[in-house]
Amino acid sequence: SHLMKIPADYIIIPNPVFTVYESQPCREPRVIASSSEINMIAENSPLPKFELSDANGSVVKSSDLKGKKCVIYFYPKDFTPGCTIEADEFSKDYKKFQKAGIEIVGISKDDVESHRKFCDKMKIPYILLADTKTTVSKLFGVWGKKKFMGREYMGINRSTFLVNKNGKIFKVFEKVKAKGHSKEVLEVYETVK
């Protein structure tokens, strides 16, 4: 038998019976979780208390964000297509967020080392937190069922929470589309006094 050469930008998805060679560049799993399956934090709720390590291994607490406007966004995984687009757009717009006094915090299940590599490659200037035990993802209600290639599994559903200076979540974005999301978030803050 001969080996088939697989292009570098294709994903190989293991299967108990056979291996699928996906003919498209890597796609992210489609979200199938309904709101009834996930108890997501509602708008006007206070920011929950949490602490996680950032890309440098330093502990960041929710209390560090007290008195600040902030964007807390949850994403599935470092280096995946959608997450890369989202991180890149937030990075490019970061100066606009800073000018408006808004901090950005990204959270995923990836570990500190993965975040460090992701920050270095993408030149991410804001905070990325490692929720390896998914404790904070569950606290915000973004951890739920997902489906890809007919297989169900648990994962982070891309969601964003906008927090005001008083520590209240005033806007929740569910099932976020990565492209254009940074601009969408900035526009919402511009309407809030």
Image (cartoon, grey):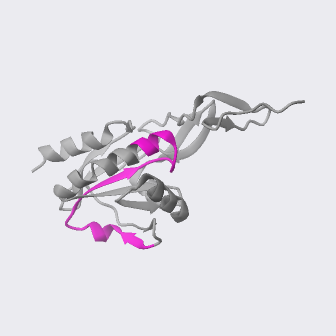
**Residue found farthest to the left:** 193
Left or right, 87 with respect to 27, comes to left
* Observer-nearest of 18 and 42: 18
In this picture, which residue range is highlighted in magenta? 58-85
Q: Residue at x 43, y 61 (%)?
A: 129
Residue 16 shows in this picture: yes
Percent of width and height locating residue 153? 60, 42
Q: Is residue 156 magenta?
A: no
* Observer-nearest of 93 and 153: 93
Quick check: 25 above or below 47? above
Q: Residue at x 39, y 48 (%)?
A: 87
* Observer-nearest of 91 and 140: 91
The answer to which image quadrant residue 36 occupies is top left
Quick check: 159 above or below 147? below
**Residue found farthest to the right:** 1
The answer to which image quadrant residue 165 occupies is bottom left
Quick check: 177 above or below 70? above
Percent of width and height locating residue 56? 45, 70
Percent of width and height locating residue 156? 49, 47
- Please give the count of numbered marks on the rendered protein: 0
Left or right, 12 with respect to 192, comes to right
Q: Is residue 79 magenta?
A: yes
Q: Residue at x 18, y 59 (%)?
A: 101
Residue 134 shows in this picture: no
In the rendered image, which quarter contains the N terminus?
Answer: top right
Q: Residue at x 52, y 55 (%)?
A: 109
Quick check: 175 above or below 131? above
**Residue found farthest to the bottom:** 58
The answer to which image quadrant residue 45 occupies is bottom left
Percent of width and height locating residue 116? 49, 62
